[in-house]
Amino acid sequence: MNFVYSVTVLALTVAGLAIVFGLLRVMNMAHGEFVALGAYSALIIQQSDLPFVLAVPLAIALCATLGWLIEWTIIRHLYSRPFDTLLATWGLAIVMREGIEAAFGREFKSVDQVLPGTVDLHVFDYPAYRLVLIAVTVLMLGILLGWFKRSNAGARIKAMVENPGLAEAAGIDTEGLARKTFVVGVSITGVAGVLLAPLVRVEPYMGFDYLLSSFFVLVVGGLGTLEGVLIGSAVIGGTDAAISTIFDKTAGYLGVLLLSILFLWLRPHGIYSRQ
Amino acid sequence: MAYIRASSCAAAFALLFVPIIWDSFTAYQLGRYLLYGMVAQGIALCWGRTGFLPLGQALFFGLGAYVTGAVLRMDPGWGLILLAFLGSILLPSVLAGLVGILVFSRQIGSGPYFSLITLALSMLGLQLANSEEWLTGGFNGMTGIPGLPGVDSYEHLFFVIVATLLATTLLLEFLSRTPFGHLLEAIRENEERLQYFGFRTGVLKAAAFGISGGLAGLAGALYAPHQGIVTPQAVGFLLSAELVVWTAVGGRFGLIGPVAGAVAIGFLSSGLRDAFQYWELVVGIAFIVAVLRFPGGIGGFCAGIASRIVRGSPAVRRRRDHRVRKRQDPGHPDLVYRNVNASSGPVEILRDLSFEINRAGTHCIIGPNGAGKTSLINVLTGKLAVSSGSVSWKGRVIGATEPYRAARHGIGRKSQVPSIFATMGVGQNLAVALWANRLDLRDMLSSAPHLWTSGMFEELLSRFPFLHDESASAGVLSVGQRQMLDFAMTMLAEPELVLLDEPCAGLSSAETEKMIDAIAEISARSGSTFLIIEHDMRLVERLSDNVLVVHQGGLLASGTMAEIRENPNVRKVYSGAGNA
Amino acid sequence: MSGKSTRVREMPDGPLLAVRRLAGGYGDILVVSEMTLSLEPGRTVCITGRNGVGKTTFVRLATGSLTPSSGTVEFLSRTITEVPSNRRRNIGIGYAPQENVVFDGLTVRENLTLHHDDRSLDRYRDLFDRFPRIPDRLQQRAGTLSGGEKKILSFCRVLAEDTSVVFLDEPTEGVQPENISLMAESIAAAKSRGRAFVIVELNLGFVEQIADEAILMENGGCSHRTSNRTTMRAELSSLLRI
């Protein structure tokens, strides 16, 4: 169950990047900062004594607005220069981090547990919030996948990324589609931040770990498919858990790093990829 | 280039007065930024000059710092200290070179995966530095590192740093003028083309990365006594990323820009951080603007202004008549395709293609569009893998190898779309081609190859007079001129098997005449074998004594033009496309 | 051809499409200079010429996938030079490019449906009858098709659209001769319903079959123009010397 949980958490944080990087091929180095933005939305809601659920629309509103602005000012100039997206979004990450620090201060904050207590699962008790988290993640990924399968959105995005000229000729408004995709991706990331907020320390620099682990999951799993996200999450989460249990937390982290380096070097398209 | 030498000497001289004019604390701070600048120079070498971005350069910096720090803590004599310095340079350099060889030999091109690998390596370094306390002092760092014996770390070490930085700047400036430096630039412009000249670009890139690693290690070695403490942050990702930011803002194409970037942002941050708390915000925005609008950074901006003021291009060097050695005499040409099959994905492109060419001279390949003509050439140069059957040239089986190997077997190719080094001068383009298969390690680091010339070189120059303007940028040439430059480059390497893919595409009729004359006369004299893809039957007739007709991936017919015209199969295929 | 897919919105008195003194290229390099062309409903203009003379560049300029440096493109008497290429399909101009003609990473079905909201294949019925290889391979990735099959797939996508002008850039490249005649049939059927074509083509036999007017390009401009269908092929092949 703990394994399922840690894979879920990974998949949750990766989902947004899977869209932005996996489909749109924007190496969004500010991915973690959007997670942080979501977590801080949860903090704002809790501090103003509003129901926790409201953090979700707030995070979506914040991330979507910001994402829209960023796409319009920065990213849209860089689709043909994928390398520069990495650099520009790195700059963006600095700016967002500093912005968060300016608004909320540098110190650790904590978001109170919203669903304390455990649920009796017959075999063992399990923290209620974790169950909710798993359920919401599965639901969210399900909706996302359903939407992609049902509408042409997935095919159109892939078409646009593969061959923007032909997509234009086929009548697809690539500019608008790219912007929408980016906004959806970062909004999902924001929601992930909300869900994680009660479980982690909330601080301006919290995003960095999510950024790295998300990239590693995508590199190991493969870009462009949900299967890739799940396989990647399982492999990365599994490696971490296994090595951490046998040795210690540091060894687990080292294992993940080594595994990722091997994949980047030998199989940059990952385990499961349409390429 | 000379102005870099002069200005860096002048800047170094001016820096010497800093401790006198300002206080020693300023000198101390400046020393640290100059060390970062040294690392940034290495990043600029990789990123600006060669085109691949290392994202984990702090790993090498920290490694150098830890090595020297550990040795210094033993209170050793100067001998051991110098040895430690050497180790601090060599260890990171070898490590970087090794990573470079392993990564670059697997893929042509400079994609983001290399950058992510270096980033992950730097994370790995950070983790190890944090956890291996016995070696590094762990999270709190390696403390109590004494200064260099007799060198006060606040003042005198500053002079050592300035001197070292001057030395590395001059060294890098020297490297940029050698063939090695030009080849790095050519990699950035068009790595595949360079491979077709027989250069192992992966090794060259690894060498550049190795040099940058050594440079970072050297900076780290000075950092240890300068700071007295080395913490895991020195290998960490944040420093790595900051180094990239400084390089980008300062200017990644030059040598002074990266140092200026590190110093300027360093000072501004330390000065403004107290006054304006969110100073990093400004740095972040400056970085984004640099990426979006000013890829050359401040340095590139200044260089642009300077060139507008100075005007005029560097004088063209007279090439001394320093004949390059003639390559081995061509033996019997013997190109054999035996039942060659090749496919791209599941699509069969070549189907059971068999033919032999047993004499020098010009051979033309014709066939309808999509027949597999270019693919036929691609299997010779390693661009397309043979799935069954074999291709051999002079008895040696070729196929499924890296492109540079084809060039080493004496095969040269010119693609249909002109493939040149666009930001480099015409002269540089020609020089790189002239060096193909002729440059050894010593030449790579000497300036003599710039003066090389050859009979072919002079002939091409007289055939295509526009090539005389060697300082003209190749990127501003017309389509026709690019085609001719590309052809000239292919011929300069004097390959024994010349592959030309529609050499007259995009040429005006006058230019076509010139090109056809050049091909006909050169091929008649050179004793090489020419294989030319051409659509225009009129040109085929003038060029060739042997025509191969390719259709649907296989050989349909071969023979003289007259024979081909009479061949019923050919007539059938071409019945749609005019009278062959 | 199903009736639905060939409805032409208006029947103008003047030309459907008028390209006037169009020029442009890549960066500073001018590839096409001063090309002029006019297209009536139900007519086909073929552009031919040697490799590298600017045929594809002209089509890219005329369809908006490259921005012209000067000149205008008018459609139904309205200047559309500035209209982004993705909107031209909706106002009635289709375009099948010369290279990278399909989305290799998508399935054949996705290639045919991604630009339609309903995702039905009804509009392709007539074309599927002519080219049965395509419906046989709906679930396959388009990247697994041969060059000629990709060209046919791209041809089907553009022909089934509800557009009154169609640009085709070398539609027969790598296509089997029997399929080339089927393409000619499809074009003829569409022409009879008032659709007009601009086709870049090197295969003079195909040009002879379908063209009402032929333009020979050289050095980025028009060097010869003919509307005489009986002498067209001889004229062009003597000028091209093939």
Image: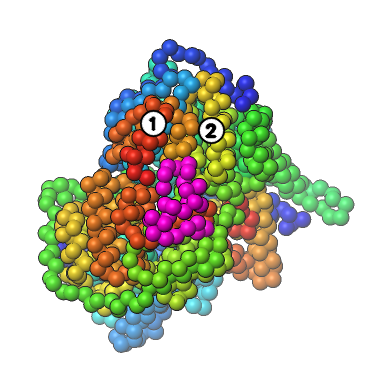
Instruction: Give the residue type at disc 2.
Output: Ala
Q: Which mark is residue B400?
A: none
Q: Mark 1 or mark 2, which has the lower sequence index?
A: 2
Residue B574 included in the magenta stretch of the image: yes
* Tag 2 subunit: C
Residue B503 seen in the current view:
no
| Marks 1 & 2 on one chain | yes
Q: Is residue B479 left or right of residue A115?
A: left
Label 1 vs label 2, nearer the camera: 1
Tell me residue A104's x, y (percent): 50, 42
Q: Residue at label 2?
A: C184
Q: Which mark is residue C231?
A: 1
Whole-Å distance between the Cαs marked 1 and 2?
A: 19 Å
Instruction: Give the residue type at disc 1.
Output: Thr
Question: Which residues are drawn in magenta?
Answer: B554-580
**SS type, badge 1:** loop
Residue B568 included in the magenta stretch of the image: yes
* Tag 1 subunit: C
Q: Nearer the viewer, residue A216 or B85?
A: A216
User: How many C-alpha atoms fall within 10 Å of the one at disc 2: few (<14), some, or many (≥20)?
Assistant: some
**SS type, badge 2:** helix
Q: Nearer the viewer, residue C57 or B370?
A: B370
Q: Nearer the viewer, residue B174 or C203?
A: C203
